[in-house]
Image (tube, rainbow, N blue to C red):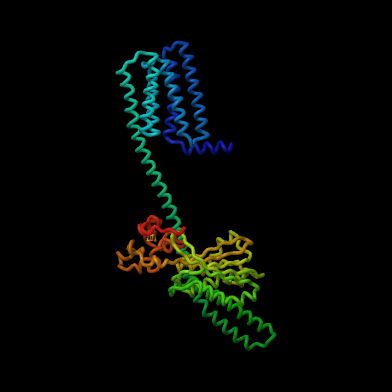
Amino acid sequence: MSTLRARYESVRSGFEIADAGFLVLRFIALAGTVGWLLVAPVPRDTVSTFLRIAGFFLSYCALGYTLLFFRFDRKRDTYRLLLLFDLSFVYLLVVHSGGFASSFFIGFYLLTALHAFYYGYRSGLGVAVVCTVVYLLAGLPVSAFEPIDFLLRVSFLFLIALPIGLLSAILRTDKEKIESLNRDLTDSLESLKRLQGKLLEVEKLSALGRLTADVAHEIRNPLTAIGGFAKRLKKHLPENTAEIEYARIIVQEVERLERILRDTLTFSREARFHLRYADMNTLLARTEAKLSDICRERRLLLAVRQAPGLPSCIVDDDQIRQALDNLVNNAIDAMADGGTLVLATRTACENGTHYVVIDVSDTGPGISPDLVQRIFEPFYSTKDIGHGTGLGLSICKKIMEEHRGSIRVSATAGGGATFSLFIPYLPVEEIFKAQCWEVMRCGVDTIGNAAEKCPAYPNYGRICWSVAGTLSETKVHCTAAGKIGDCRKCTFYEIVSPSCPS
Ligand code: SF4
């Protein structure tokens, strides 16, 4: 039943005006034949012949529409098959109703018109030729041949086929254009919605960031005073008393609050980066040196894999180190019972943009898919209360976005996790080629300075679409990209024709 309903739905969705035309033609043919039998003075034995012809008509129509129902995707072939039966049907009507003199010859007009409309003028002319032959075959044995009359009638077949076929070709082209415009419009609306969503999220986060920074500043001074007084109090209190224990707790908690404040301020602070070329393998080597003792203490195996010949990237290496440290700390915390920590570098290419990637993998309990969606949210933490501020991954994400890159996670519940920092870079041979602000003249034409206007200036002008445009994983910074909604429609994108080596 459900299969039949599914078939019905597919037929309904693909049913066109021409299909309706074919169906209506059949009803008209049947009604015309029955009407003619009822009103015309037809001899009794001729009536039975016509009833048999009508039966033949109904049978092949039923067969044809059953075929159409089950193979609607092959409807053009089914209509061709039905054309053979239709020609036979009109042939029989003409033969049994007076040959050339029969009024049923108009059946040929209907067939020619419908096929010209459905298949175009070439097929229409072909059907007109076949109808001419069938009409001749049907008329000759029955009645006298009237050449002028015959030529006049068949010439109309061709006069019908040509304009209707041409008109249908124009309609079909227009329909395809409208469909393609509709598709473009739907795509544009979808990307506009996506951009609006991103913009809203960014605005909310930046408002929240400003508020958080203000509150953090206000809290910091009294907190420093409380911590200082608690430390002094601890020095003056006698050992092994409840009071010194209280003072120790106050000092510990103040230190924890200071950590949270530091992370909060890092997260909400305006970026002030010092970008320069840096080698990510060197960064990894420094982290390895720092980690060896900790890993030994925690019974962790440390594996470092440096990709050879890694290109340098333009980064603030202190910031990237902070992101890397956060990921490493999380990985170590995730392997409380020992395991393997892997740090690796590699290169990747997406949307024609090259990246240096730093992977941090652990063999901890992994992350379930529903948590993966939330781990980059500020203050979201899977650690016990008192451990971590819930800002570590948000800070990593912020640092990567400010480097026009991204952070990704691949994890399964029970199967460990890998966090990857994607840092975009321009291959050396690309650096001196035309940049996006030179082509798009963003800011150059208005304020004469791309530096103030172009978000990809000065380092990413050949990969603007994936660092500041619509193919980036963060918000759209480029004004042109915001307007056109898709960098792939941008002149600069077309000029560069980005691609990745296969
Ligand atoms: S629209 Fe996209 S491709 Fe064009 S300049 Fe902007 S970011 Fe680059």
x and y percentages locating residue 184 in the rendered image: 40, 49
Relative to residue 319, is residue 496 depicted above or below?
above
Quadrant of the rendered structure where residue 410 is?
A: bottom right
Q: Is residue 1 left or right of residue 443?
A: right
Residue at (38% x, 24% y) in the render: 131
Q: Is residue 140 left or right of residue 260?
A: left
Relative to residue 14, is residue 266 depicted above or below?
below
The answer to whether residue 272 of the structure is visible from this angle is no
x and y percentages locating residue 1 in the rendered image: 59, 36
Residue at (42% x, 66% y) in the render: 427
| Location of ligand 1 given as a quarter of the image | bottom left
Instruction: From the viewer's side, name the closer residue of 473 and 230.
Output: 473
Relative to residue 315, is residue 464 depicted above or below?
above
Quadrant of the rendered structure where residue 300 is?
A: bottom right
Q: Is residue 265 left or right of residue 382?
A: left
Quadrant of the rendered structure where residue 446 is?
A: bottom left
x and y percentages locating residue 274 in the rendered image: 43, 75
x and y percentages locating residue 273 in the rendered image: 44, 73
